[in-house]
Image (cartoon, rainbow, N blue to C red):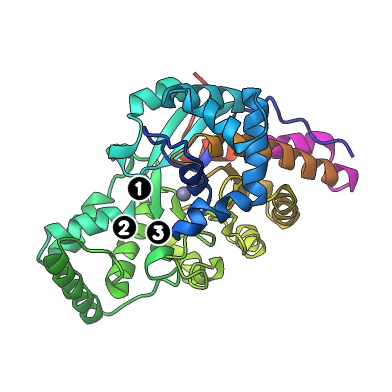
Amino acid sequence: MPAIELDDVAVVDNHCHAVQTLQRNDPADFRAYFTESPDPSMRAGAAGETAYYRRLLRAMARFADVEPTEEAVLADRAGKSTDELVARYFADAGIGGLVVDTGFPTPDTALADATFDAASRADRVTLLRLEVEFQELIAEHADYPALLDAVRAATADVRSRGFAGLKSIVAYRTGLAIERWSDDEARASFRAAREEAARTGAVRLGHKPLLDTLLHLAFENAAAQELPLQFHVGYGDPDADLRRAAPLELRAVLEERAYRSMPVVLLHNCWPYFREGAYLASVYPNAWLDVSYGIPFLSTGEMRSMTRAMLGVAPFSKLMYSSDGGRVPEIHWLSAHDGRALLGEVLGELVADGDLDEREARSAGEAILRGNACALYGLEGTRR
Ligand SMILES: [Zn+2]
């Protein structure tokens, strides 16, 4: 059945990361960009044995017009500067806009904004990483009520601080089942966090009563500003307990009426819980589902299954394309091509089945690839 043609649509990547200045081209180092495993032997070895990585190498070889081998592709890549790589890939991928999570990689290792913008020619907005902000404020405040005031102040007018939304990695810390705690419990948790900061020089915010309490303050403020909040959900490095990173754990937040004006974006397709994520987007007015074709690193067939499942139940107005690419520009690039192709294919199936007509399918494709994200984050999304 014919696919819906989406090649002319400038994608808006609703969740991605910066590209690093130093690019590694040794096979063992390059493979490590394409796994979430922290294990050195996995990163240098088995990360090269996936369907994703093999597809990537072939796509890179076609684009660079070299032999489809890891050696030839990496030799070609090593001969180009980082901004040249960004410019070539982003132009070829037709990327019109980016929503960048600056929490990773650290800004000191990333291409400077001006250099990146000149090379990518994409419209760009950034997100405020809540846990990073909280950790800094905890280190600065010995007094608990003063910390709460500081968190309220930091999240009171997020757009005026230059951010288009918030990002939370609570799934990686204490899980998505965010609870309400008594003042005594939250204070005890704050004291433990301060002790950790005094002892180790930094705090890694794994103190659940405190983190949950600070998140509620941020949610109240986000709702007042109708500010989108992205949650890491599902697939990620094993630092997150995948059971506690499942989307249904967010029920309390999504049920909270006071937060209904805070758009909640469930990242990474919630993979492997994409059906649950699509369900949430189909019943909660403020739940959006991120449709990423970069991370998780999937085969074409698994991306197709996922796309069918999500488009099978979620409103098209609640789905947003992304790559979750970062460090290297290849993930942003391949994902844009894969996203257009698979959305086009699955929308074509919906037309063949009589679910949609061609005009509706094209309009759903445009909304998922760019329109929904432009509206939610206030982006133009047009290449410069
Ligand atoms: Zn990410």
> Dot 1 corresponds to which residue?
103
Label 3: how many Cα within 10 Å (few below 14, some 14–19, many 20+): many
Q: Residue at x 36, y 23 (%)?
A: 115
Q: Residue at x 59, y 47 (%)?
A: 292
In this rendering, the answer to whether 101 lies above or below 363 is below
Task: Answer whether labels 3 and 1 touch (C-beta < 8 Å).
Answer: yes
Label 1: how many Cα within 10 Å (few below 14, some 14–19, many 20+): many
In percent of width and height, residue 253 lies at: 46, 66
Nearest to the eye among marks 1 and 2: give it: 1
Count the numbered circles shown: 3
Label 2's element? helix
At label 2, the amino acid type is Glu
Q: Residue at x 38, y 70 (%)?
A: 174
Determine which quarter of the picture holds residue 164: top left
The residues colored magenta run 351-368
Cβ(mark 3) to ligand 1 < 8 Å?
Answer: no
Q: How far apart in space, not on screen, are marks 1 and 2 (Cα)?
A: 9 Å
The earlier-in-sequence mark between 1 and 2 is 1
At label 1, the amino acid type is Gly
Residue furthest front in the image: 71
Q: How far apart in space, not on screen, are marks 3 and 2 (Cα)?
A: 7 Å
Main SS of the magenta segment? helix
> Dot 3 corresponds to which residue?
169
In percent of width and height, residue 248 lies at: 56, 70
Residue 329 falls inside the magenta stretch: no
Label 3's element? loop
